Image (spheres, grey):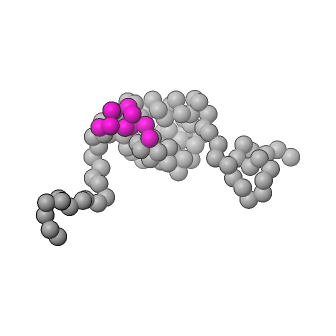
Amino acid sequence: MTMDHFDHGRPGKRRRGNLPKHVTDLLRGWLNDHLHHPYPTEDEKQMLMAQTGLNINQVSNWFINARRRRLPSITGGRVDTDQKPSHSMGNPGTSQ
């Protein structure tokens, strides 16, 4: 009986597996080439899926995590994107 690298023989327990280096190199390369707008289109995600063998959720989640974890260190803490914050903090000098 063969086990995938997520199972490790523990029923009901799934362990996170690291992606192969060639996959992360390809995704990281795309991110570095698109620092001005690090949001792949659906067509670009489909292309990355075909190149990496990942599914759409894995590609999307990799980019979500990369924008949070990698972009601040790559851009020195400054990330210019077209995304607007989901909430705004009021000006402390005004009453609401």
Q: Is residue 40 visible?
A: no
Identified at 47% across, 32% down, the residue is 28
Q: Position of residue 84 (x, y in %)?
A: 27, 52
Q: Which residues are magenta?
A: 69-78
Residue 11 in view of the camera:
yes
Q: Position of residue 20 (x, y in %)?
A: 61, 33
Q: Is residue 50 above or below residue 32?
A: below
At a point 54% along the width and 33% down the height, the residue shown is: 24
Residue 86's place in the image compared with 9, above or below, is below
Above or below, 87 relative to 26: below
Relative to the observer, which residue lies in front, 45 or 67?
67
Name the residue located 80 percent from the left edge and 50 percent from the top edge.
9
Residue 32 falls left or right of residue 20:
left
Between 94 and 42, the residue placed more toward the observer is: 94
- The residue lying furthest to the left in this view is 94
Q: Residue furthest bottom?
A: 96
Q: Give the residue drawn at x 37%, y 37%.
A: 72
